[in-house]
């Protein structure tokens, strides 16, 4: 079946009101994106951030009454004319798997692989499954992020995966603070951790983490929490790939669950924010040198270190 896509800038319109009208006319999916060039980098935990210039895209079946939708938008929103918009035909695709076009098997360090569910790293017919091309036993995470953040394609996630791959994790416990898709905690379990706690305030992230844990046969060794109030430590390792503002705000809470001499990694931090974040953790953490990586014109950082002795 072919589809039609209705794209409209919201300008000053209330997103929830417009989404409700789209839904009433049969939208199969709704997506909010940035219509300008001012990405939101610092939403508060639990909030759904919006851009100054927000664009709404609705996916509709071929027989949807899009003329009626336009009429309803004008009438119910009191508009003489709609903001910029377009209606376009789309060829049929497997929309739930469309994200795979930009996501293939990726290697981090010597032995960690992240690969889309249904794919295999370095070729299923290579005769090397279970070990990478230099003969090291591979730890493979099969991932379907759903609506949650985290595939390994972003610099912040990649930096954390590389850090985990370089640790000796056998028998250790880990807290994944702001788990997104669960990629970091599941990778840690595949790398030898005995138990993981994955926490995220976004219900979609919790669902994605639970599903990915089942898909990787680690559901019995991971606990998924929807609130930081439920976290009970202490942990040998903590990784928090969120954003600078919440990292600073929750510094004492995060470090309070880390064992003495336990290992910590923080990411989701722009290079110019690194000093502020390190200062917030300095009473508890002895940091190594920051690691920086450029992506799409921005420089991201990973801050890692050990908890100081009490």
Image (spheres, helix red, strand yellow):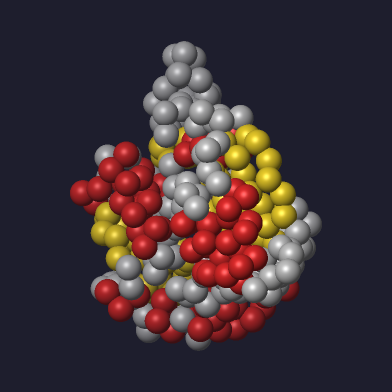
Viewer-side residue, 65 vs 200: 65
Q: Residue furthest left?
A: 220
The correct choice, above or below, for 4 with respect to 305 in the image is: above
26 left or right, relative to 274: left
Instruction: Residue 308: name its quadrant.
Output: bottom left
| Location of residue 123 with respect to 203 vertically, above or below | above
Q: Position of residue 148 (x, y in %)?
A: 46, 54
**Residue drawn at point x = 53 percent, y = 38 percent:** 63
- Along the viewing direction, whichever of 113 and 227 lies nearer the viewer: 227
Q: Split into 4 quadrants, where in the image is the C terminus?
A: bottom left
Q: Is residue 293 left or right of residue 165?
A: right
Q: Position of residue 152 (x, y in %)?
A: 55, 47
Rendered location of residue 62, percent (x, y): 55, 36
Can the viewer see residue 160 in this picture? no
Nearer to us in this view, 143 or 173:
143
Residue at x 49% of width, y 15% of height: 126
* 214 lies left or right of 103: left
- Whether residue 250 is visible to the viewer of this picture, yes or no, is yes
Q: Residue at x 62, y 44 (%)?
A: 5
Q: Position of residue 18 (x, y in %)?
A: 56, 65
Q: Residue placed at 30% from the left, 78% from the top?
A: 229
- Drawn side of residue 88 relative to residue 22, left or right: right
């Amino acid at each position: 079946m072919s589809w039609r896509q209705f794209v409209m800038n919201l300008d000053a319109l209330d997103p929830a009101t417009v989404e409700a009208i789209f839904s009433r006319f049969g939208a199969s999916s709704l997506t909010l994106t940035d219509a300008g060039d001012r990405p939101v980098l610092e939403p508060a935990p639990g909030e759904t951030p919006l851009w100054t210039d927000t664009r709404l895209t609705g996916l509709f079946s071929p027989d949807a009454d899009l003329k009626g939708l336009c009429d309803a938008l004008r009438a119910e929103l009191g508009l003489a004319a709609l903001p910029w918009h377009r209606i376009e035909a789309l060829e049929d695709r497997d929309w739930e798997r469309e994200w795979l076009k930009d996501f293939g098997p990726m290697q981090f360090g010597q032995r960690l692989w992240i690969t889309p569910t249904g794919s295999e790293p370095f070729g299923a017919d290579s005769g090397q499954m279970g070990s990478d091309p230099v003969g090291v036993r591979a730890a493979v995470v099969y991932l379907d992020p759903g609506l949650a953040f985290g595939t390994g394609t972003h610099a912040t996630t990649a930096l954390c995966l590389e850090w985990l791959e370089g640790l000796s994790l056998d028998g250790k416990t880990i807290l994944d603070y702001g788990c997104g898709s669960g990629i970091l905690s599941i990778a840690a379990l595949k790398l030898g951790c005995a138990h993981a706690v994955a926490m995220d305030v976004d219900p979609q992230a919790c669902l994605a983490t639970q599903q990915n844990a089942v898909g990787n046969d680690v559901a019995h060794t991971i606990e998924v929490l929807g609130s930081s109030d439920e976290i009970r430590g202490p942990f040998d390792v903590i990784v928090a790939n969120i954003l600078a503002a919440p990292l600073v705000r929750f510094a004492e809470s995060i470090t309070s669950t880390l064992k003495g001499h336990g290992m910590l990694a923080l990411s989701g931090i722009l290079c110019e924010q690194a000093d502020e974040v390190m200062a917030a953790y300095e009473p508890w953490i002895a940091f190594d040198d920051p690691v920086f990586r450029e992506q799409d014109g921005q420089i991201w950082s990973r801050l890692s270190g050990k908890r100081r002795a009490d």
